[in-house]
């Protein structure tokens, strides 16, 4: 009896990540290149996690501890297999033989260089198995089919997949391409894969030949269609940029549907994990690196750059603010133009409006930090903290030499260099006393006027 419920069927996913990436022209392996601040491999593993599988195997190239580590980070239970030689996609799947022999209802094969695949598509591929197919290939119609394998259909049935390099002129005219991802019946997978040879232009063991192997065994082979933007493969940096563009447009749309206003969406760049609340306003030219959260009603003004930062409800940042990791802007606080914040908690309603660096610090609620204030947090060896109490007022152009505390409600006179703690409600000044010489400027001008000009 075939269960048509994918949830009732067990599934092994095998992610092929033994790409050398020669066409990336990079010292970094292809699948670790990033889209939206996350490696392509981690994108695929995240989709798998959302789709739900019983086991995940990742096939890496020999000595690629970096890829194995990235896989473990993204999916701690993933089993890592090494493909000793890069002899083709079918050969790569067989590197996970030890997982395959455990026996699963469904085997899903994914490519780590196809990062935008959605959980729904993975479920649809498995659904085809649940409905009786032994092999389901994922098809799509890209704008430019060159380079992709072609799905050959006869009488509505998938009969073969032909690699671009092996295809005839007539076959190349087919717009229906192979996305590379495939679902195989776990019962048949091993014998189909073992039947695949390497008699082709590239002398590789092609996973795509599993279709003909299945047909020869009298098994049903089908294809499932995916959107052209979802399953594009990334073989070079031009395709990487295309994938990034698609990913960004997905993120922008999700942000807007979630209740954020993006004034010029095409100029706002998100990371995979950026979270925006409702009624957040994001002005043009804003960049979110990983780890950012913007709560309800906050405003991110133009040209602001954020990484690992939290902007709490009703706070504002920018224009031209830089929020670095562990910047935490309290509710209704304000960080203005040319202000850099790093590892600092800014209290509710506090204001740092212009031209400041606040790092390794805490700023109490409603404190006011004047223009040009610098927390001197680094002596060349160690970092130290600056703590500014609630309601404190730091005059413009002050240097706060950490470790140092400014008590609640205290004042710091403009232009001070503060090296010792300031008690609550006190006034600290550390600048030369002003001297004034009455009439000096007028006398100076008169004297200069009498002298001959020198060049
Ligand atoms: C593959 C498909 C092609 C499809 C295209 C979609 C095959 C034979 N061809 O071609 O039909 O249209 O993807 O993007 O399957 N890999 C290994 N070990 C290997 C070879 C590849 O792990 O020995 C991995 C790569 O890291 C990559 C994936 O498998 O993630 C696909 O390999 P790649 O060389 O990029 O295949 P394409 O030529 O793009
Ligand atoms: Ca590819």
Image (spheres, rainbow, N blue to C red):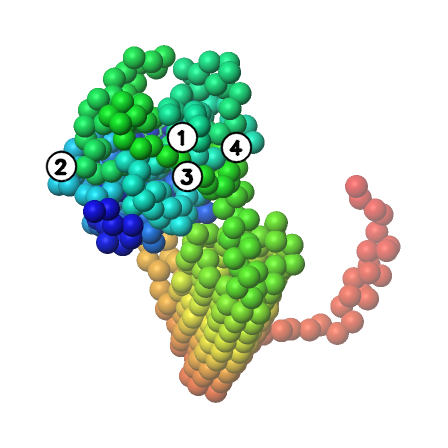
Estimate the spatial distance between the alpha carbons at disc 2 and disc 4, rounded to whole Å.
35 Å
Look at discs 4 and 3 and give the one toward the viewer: 3
Residue 378 percent coordinates (x, y): 39, 58
Look at discs 1 and 4 and give the one toward the viewer: 1
Q: What residue is shown with label 1?
A: 157
Question: Disc 3 on helix, strand or loop?
Answer: strand
Look at discs 2 and 1 and give the one toward the viewer: 1
Q: Is mark 1 within 8 Å of ligand 1?
A: no
**Which of marks 3 and 4 precedes in the sequence?**
4
Q: Residue at x 55, y 54 (%)?
A: 252
In which quadrant will I find the C terminus?
top right
Q: What residue is shown with label 2?
A: 101
Q: Who is closer to the viewer here, 439 or 354?
A: 354
Q: Furthest residue to the bottom?
A: 425
Question: Disc 2 on helix, strand or loop?
Answer: loop
Say whether residue 77 is left or right of residue 221. Answer: left
Question: Disc 1 on helix, strand or loop?
Answer: strand
Estimate the spatial distance between the alpha carbons at disc 2 and disc 1, rounded to whole Å.
29 Å
Estimate the spatial distance between the alpha carbons at disc 2 and disc 3, rounded to whole Å.
26 Å
**Which of marks 4 and 1 precedes in the sequence?**
4
Question: Disc 4 on helix, strand or loop?
Answer: loop
Estimate the spatial distance between the alpha carbons at disc 4 and disc 3, rounded to whole Å.
15 Å
Estimate the spatial distance between the alpha carbons at disc 1 and disc 4, rounded to whole Å.
20 Å
Q: Neighbour class for label 3 at 10 Å: few (<14), some, many (≥20)?
A: some
All told, the count of numbered labels is 4
Q: Who is closer to the viewer here, 305 or 193?
A: 193
């Amino acid at each position: 009896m075939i269960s048509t419920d994918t949830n009732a069927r067990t599934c092994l996913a095998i992610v092929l990540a033994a790409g050398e990436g020669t066409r990336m022209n990079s010292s970094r392996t292809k699948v670790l290149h990033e889209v939206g601040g996350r490696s392509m491999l981690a994108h695929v593993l995240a989709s798998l996690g959302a789709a739900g599988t019983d086991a995940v195997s990742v096939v890496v190239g020999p000595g690629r501890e970096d890829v194995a580590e990235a896989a473990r980070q993204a999916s701690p239970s993933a089993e890592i297999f090494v493909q000793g030689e890069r002899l083709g996609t079918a050969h790569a799947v067989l590197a996970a033989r030890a997982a395959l022999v455990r026996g699963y209802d469904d085997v899903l094969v994914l490519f780590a260089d196809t990062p935008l695949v959605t959980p729904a598509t993975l479920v649809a591929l498995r659904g085809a198995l649940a409905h009786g197919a032994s092999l389901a290939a994922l098809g799509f119609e890209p704008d430019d089919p060159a380079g992709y394998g072609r799905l050959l259909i006869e009488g509505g049935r998938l009969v073969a997949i032909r690699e671009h390099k092996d295809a005839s002129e007539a076959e190349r005219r087919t717009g229906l391409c192979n996305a590379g991802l495939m679902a195989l019946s776990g019962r048949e997978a091993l014998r189909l894969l073992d039947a695949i040879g390497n008699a082709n232009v590239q002398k590789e063991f092609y996973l795509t030949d599993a279709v003909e192997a299945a047909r020869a065994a009298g098994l049903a082979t089908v294809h499932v269609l995916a959107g052209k933007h979802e399953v594009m493969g990334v073989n070079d940096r031009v395709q990487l940029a295309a994938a990034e563009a698609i990913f960004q447009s997905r993120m922008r749309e999700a942000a807007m549907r979630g209740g954020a206003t993006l004034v010029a969406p095409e100029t706002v760049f998100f990371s995979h994990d950026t979270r925006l609340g409702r009624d957040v306003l994001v002005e043009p030219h804003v960049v979110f690196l990983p780890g950012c959260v913007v709560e309800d009603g906050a405003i991110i003004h133009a040209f602001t750059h954020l990484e690992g930062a939290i902007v709490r409800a009703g706070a504002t940042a920018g224009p031209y603010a830089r929020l670095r990791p562990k910047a935490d802007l309290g509710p209704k606080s304000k960080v203005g133009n040319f202000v850099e914040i790093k590892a600092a908690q800014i209290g509710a309603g506090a204001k740092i409006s212009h031209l400041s660096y606040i790092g390794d610090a805490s700023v109490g609620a409603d404190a006011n930090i004047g223009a040009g204030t610098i927390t001197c947090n680094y002596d060349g060896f160690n970092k130290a903290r600056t703590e500014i109490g609630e309601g404190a007022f730091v005059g413009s152009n002050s240097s706060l030499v950490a470790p140092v505390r400014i008590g609640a409600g205290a004042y710091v006179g403009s232009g001070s260099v503060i090296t010792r703690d300031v008690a609550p409600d006190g006034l600290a000044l550390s600048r030369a006393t002003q001297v004034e010489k009455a009439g000096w400027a007028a006398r100076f001008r008169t004297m200069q006027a009498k002298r001959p000009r020198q060049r």
